[in-house]
Image (cartoon, rainbow, N blue to C red):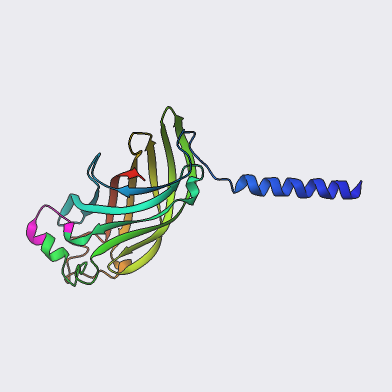
């Protein structure tokens, strides 16, 4: 009797572990792991950034986004990948300010041509809807955000939409507003500018489009 109880307990533990590690997935006809490449076939891949400072505001600044990631449709938590923003594509609405942004005392585009986010995993995955050829989920993307050559661990709130289409399935990702500290990434700017004309905290969001291979 004693051994039967122990055996039952062990079976329950194994079942609990396997269930918890199964991950959260979409209920779609498409299965397995997909490689998603960001492209502009459906919409324009762009990040938007804003700065609100006492003497000047930058609203709706844009930059081009590229990258790719792997998406396990049965285990969204296992998502990994890399998203890149080219510094030389950043536009603030004023050409002279755009050139200053690329200089060494700002983002130093020559030494650090890309702002990157390395996705390590997703957490807090919640399926919003799934079925009829379309799946929508909300999650937190955990990874390393690198700006000006300085990487920091960051968690970003996102929404993923997966659509079954011929010949290639489509993916849209909405990246909700997240703050980036210039100081934490070693961006000093010209003396007296940060804090007066440029905010110490820059807010970024993005809408990304890709197709599955």
93 in the magenta segment: yes
* Quadrant housing residue 120: bottom left
Which of the pair 7/169 is nearer the observer?
Answer: 169
Query: From this viewpoint, which residue is outermost toward the top?
Result: 132
Q: Residue furthest right?
A: 1
Residue 164, located in which quarter of the rendered image?
A: top left
Left or right position of 52 against 21: left
Residue 175 visible in the current orientation = yes
Residue 119 drawn at (x, y percent): 40, 56
Residue appearing at x 12%, y 60% in the figure = 98
Decide: is 89 above or below 127.
Answer: below
Q: Residue at x 11, y 63 (%)?
A: 99
Left or right of residue 198, residue 38 in this image: right
> In this orientation, which residue lies closer to the viewer: 155 or 167?
167
The answer to whether residue 40 is above or below residue 108 is: above
Q: Residue at x 39, y 55 (%)?
A: 81
Question: Is residue 50 something one can see in this rendering?
Answer: no
Query: Could you tell me which residue is drawn at 32 percent across and 36 percent down?
Result: 167
Q: Quadrant of residue 193?
A: bottom left
- Asked if 157 appears above or below 128 in the picture, the reply is below
> Is-magenta flag for residue 135?
no
Q: Residue 199 or 135: which is nearer the viewer?
A: 135
Highlighted magenta segment, given as a residue range? 89-97
């Amino acid at each position: 009797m004693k051994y039967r109880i122990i055996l039952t307990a062990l079976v329950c533990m194994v079942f609990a572990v396997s269930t918890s590690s199964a991950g959260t997935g979409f209920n779609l006809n498409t299965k397995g792991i997909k490689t998603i490449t960001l492209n502009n076939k459906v919409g324009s891949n762009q990040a938007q950034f804003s700065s609100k400072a006492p003497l000047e505001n930058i609203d709706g600044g844009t930059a081009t986004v590229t990258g790719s990631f792997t998406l396990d449709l049965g285990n969204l938590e296992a998502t990994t990948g890399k998203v890149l923003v080219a510094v030389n594509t950043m536009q603030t609405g004023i050409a002279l300010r755009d050139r200053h942004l690329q200089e060494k005392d700002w983002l130093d585009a020559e030494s650090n041509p890309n702002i990157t986010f390395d996705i390590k995993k997703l957490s807090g995955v919640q399926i919003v809807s799934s079925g009829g050829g379309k799946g929508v989920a909300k999650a937190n993307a955990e990874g390393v955000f690198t700006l000006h050559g300085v990487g920091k661990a960051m968690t970003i709130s996102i929404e993923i939409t997966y659509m079954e289409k011929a010949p290639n399935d489509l993916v849209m990702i909405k990246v909700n507003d997240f703050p980036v500290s210039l100081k934490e990434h070693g961006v000093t700017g010209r003396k007296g500018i940060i804090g007066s004309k440029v905010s110490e905290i820059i807010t970024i969001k993005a809408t990304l489009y890709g197709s599955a291979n």
